[in-house]
Amino acid sequence: MIGGLDFSVVSDNLSYFFIGRYPKGPLGGVGLTLYLAVVSLALSFIGGLVLGLMSVSRNRLLRFGSSTVIQTIRGMPLLMVIFWMFFLLPAMLGSGMTASWTIIVALTLFTSAYMSEIVRAGIVGIPKGQTEAAISTGLSHGQAMFYIILPQALRNMIPSFVNQFVSMIKDTSLAFIVGVTELTQIATQINNRTMLYPTEIFIFIAVIYFVICFAFTELSRWLERRLAYRKAI
Amino acid sequence: MIRFEGVHKWFGKLHVLNNINLHVRAGEVVVVCGPSGSGKSTLIRTINDLEPINEGKLIVDGMDLSEKKTDINKLRAEIGFVFQQFNLYPHLSVLKNITLAPMKIRNKTRKEAEEKALALLERVGLSEKRDAYPTQLSGGQQQRVAIARGLAMDPKIMLFDEPTSALDPEMIGEVLQVMKDLALSGMTMIVVSHEMGFAREVSHRIIFMDFGTILEEAPPEEFFKNPKHDRAKQFLKQILSPMH
């Protein structure tokens, strides 16, 4: 008992909170939350890079394509994107699409749109002289982007990336709405079953979310310092 | 080597280059001077197509820049360009700044490119800085690395856009010395600069520009002794007297 709270509901269900019914059933809980976050993070990094590069392209069609995607996605609530994917994707691709993957696609689309603006700002923020110097030595615009602009821009983008990713880690909790057994869904299930301990349960998962986000932020701070050291400034 | 024929360029309504006719031969060193806003930087930037021309004909190393089919990247590889603000790549070491283009464009091996880079660093007096990063160097050192970077592609032409204007006075000399050595080695050079000492000593021809046109074009001794145009006289008076 801590201040009238009874956390035995947490300790009794600890393995269910962390891995769901795994290994007898599918992975759930914190494990699934991390899985959703890591996969969506990797995919939206790529998605954001592609959309961002398209938006600074010299080709009008590419710019138009990326701005259409970005404007559309940014104009929708994330929950709406999740519903769209949940109902649309299986209809389009057949029943092979699991609920987890519809969430991953929704989070990736949503986060990519925001990431692409970070990428665009990062690229535009590198002085024009860098591109001019690179193309003056005979490099193509693509080579200048790849060897000169992106390495500098990506480093500057790290803090904004972290912001976006932390936000996305927390957004995985919206997966509970379509029945994906990630941490929030598990907590709701246990709460519905026991009825008596909502405070304890939701304090516990709040702490878990905080620890995950905090650990991720620290990891990226370390990465930032390391890259700065290599640049020797 | 470089031939302008009736070249015009506009920035919006501003007529930055107005009927430029100029022929620079191989091995010639030409200094371009004039008040700010006279179009001299634009002039030099058209030569490697950093600023495309709007009208007229511009032929560089046998390639026609007004022709759409011209492979601009290939042309640029033959022309070294040195900027006022150096524009070294801050995320790469001095050595990598120099070896990048030769490895990517000329397909040199790392070993070949580094040997060449080290020879060039020795030539500009910076051998010991090979592993330093640009931010660790003084302005004069950065500009000498930038010159080495340009030379690493074995260019046929070197262009300098106010190479000493962003430098502290005590660093100007070291950069001018490198440029002077380069000029004496027979490199074709066009230098936008107000360094009249350099112009007098090294150049074959001085070009004076104002309002986007070439007002005067003469060998240095003639230009300094006997400038024909009033604007040139006024300009020289201001630039040659330290206090005015």
Image (cartoon, grey):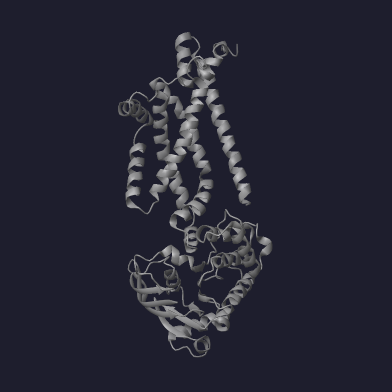
> Which quadrant of the figure contains the N terminus of chain A?
top right
Residue drawn at (39%, 51%), measured in percent from left and top? A57
One can see residue A210 in this view: yes
Q: Position of residue A81 (x, y in %)?
A: 35, 31
One can see residue A203 in this view: no
Residue B195 vs A106, above or below: the answer is: below
Q: Position of residue B41 (x, y in %)?
A: 45, 71
Residue drawn at (42%, 44%), measured in percent from left and top? A50
Label tally: 0
**Residue B22, image quadrant:** bottom left
Residue A8 vs A39, above or below: the answer is: above
Residue B211 vs A195, above or below: the answer is: below
Observer-nearest residue: B193 or B110? B110
Residue, far right: B128
Q: Position of residue A11 (x, y in %)?
A: 58, 13
Q: Position of residue A210 (x, y in %)?
A: 54, 27
Observer-nearest residue: B229 or B84? B84
Observer-nearest residue: A88 or B31? A88
Report whether B185 appears left or right of B12: right
